[in-house]
Amino acid sequence: EMAGLKEKQSESKKIAIGSLLNLADEPSKKVLCSYSATATYKTNLENMKAHNAPVLEACAQLLGFKVREAEKKLYKNQEILCDRMILKIESLFDTNCDACPTV
């Protein structure tokens, strides 16, 4: 039973990331593709941080973050921005959609 549940969870993660990728522009896709639902938080953070600021900002905006206020960056550094993005991506995994049976 547990194995089935885990499989189902990873399936819903793939779907969540897939639907983000459908909306994403090229820079955002790069960032999203460096995130892995099966990797640890630390690994994902390292992989995401490897991208440059403009690419990360594009992805952050796709995820609904405001990254600049009149040219002033709203995030102190890329690590904080990546952290927020990972949490945001992972919050999408928990969203119940009408097609999913609620547990």
Image (cartoon, grey):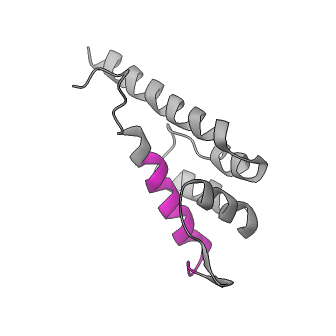
**Rendered location of residue 44, percent (x, y):** 56, 51
Q: Residue at x 51, y 42 (%)?
A: 39
Range drawn in magenta: 74-90
**Rendered location of residue 41, percent (x, y):** 47, 52
Q: Residue at x 65, y 47 (%)?
A: 34
Residue 52 shows up from this direction: no
Q: Is residue 5 above or below residue 90?
A: above
Left or right: 5 in relation to 12: left
Q: Residue at x 67, y 51 (%)?
A: 31
Q: Is residue 34 above or below residue 56?
A: above
* Secondary structure mainly formed by the magenta segment: helix
Question: Can you say which quadrant of the picture contains the C terminus?
Answer: top left
Is 79 colored magenta in this rendering? yes
The quadrant in which residue 98 appears is: top left
Q: Specify the farthest residue to the left.
A: 103
Left or right: 38 in relation to 61: left
Is 91 colored magenta in this rendering? no
Q: Is residue 16 above or below residue 47?
A: above
Question: Can you say which quadrant of the picture contains the N terminus?
Answer: top left
Q: Which of 101 and 43 lies nearest the eye of the viewer? A: 101
Q: Specify the farthest residue to the right.
A: 26
Left or right: 53 in relation to 48: right
Q: Which of 83 and 39 lies nearest the eye of the viewer? A: 83
Residue 90 shows up from this direction: yes
Tell me how many marks there are: 0
**Rendered location of residue 46, percent (x, y):** 60, 59
Q: Residue at x 47, y 24 (%)?
A: 11
